[in-house]
Amino acid sequence: MQNKKQIVKVGLMGFLTLLLLNFPFLLIANKKGFFGSFPNLFLYVFGCWISMIIIIAITLERPFRKNK
């Protein structure tokens, strides 16, 4: 990691992931229903997981910019 701001951003994304995959949000997604042939909870969990991976990857791949 290049600087302290990136470390903080990745830490916050990890914390947000833990919040989104915690009981109250899982309870909201655990409704009877399907999207296509997939249950809603399955899509919610894997949607949160893959979106956080993409957001963290974008955060870490940005070039380092110094304030002028």
Image (spheres, rainbow, N blue to C red):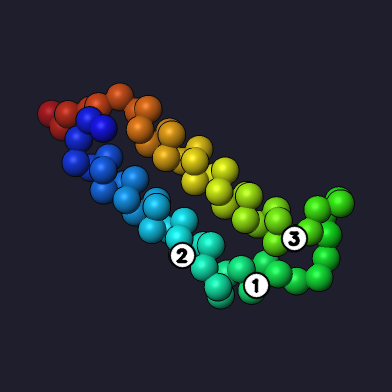
User: SS at mark 2?
Assistant: helix
User: SS at mark 1?
Assistant: helix
Q: Is residue 46 left or right of residue 38?
A: left
Q: Is residue 24 left or right of residue 14?
A: right
**Residue 64, above or below 25:** above
First reached walking from the N terminus: tag 3 or tag 1:
1
Callout 3: few (<14), some (14-19), or many (20+) C-alpha neighbours within 10 Å?
some
First reached walking from the N terminus: tag 2 or tag 3:
2
Amino acid type for the residue under numbered disc 1? Ile
Tag 3 residue: 40
Of all residues, the one furthest to the right in this rendering is: 37
Q: Position of residue 55 (x, y in %)?
A: 46, 41
- Which quarter of the figure is the C terminus placed in? top left
| Residue 44 figure quarter | bottom right
Q: Identify the residue shown where x is 52% and y is 68%.
A: 22
User: SS at mark 3?
Assistant: helix
First reached walking from the N terminus: tag 1 or tag 2:
2
| Residue 6 figure quarter | top left
Query: What is the CA distance from the residue labelled 3 to the residue labelled 1?
Result: 10 Å
Q: Which mark is residue 28?
A: 1
Q: Position of residue 28 (x, y in %)?
A: 65, 72
Amino acid type for the residue under numbered disc 3? Asn
Q: Which mark is residue 19?
A: 2
Q: Identify the residue shown where x is 64% and y is 74%.
A: 27
Labels 1 and 2 touching (C-beta < 8 A): no
**Residue 33, above or below 52:** below
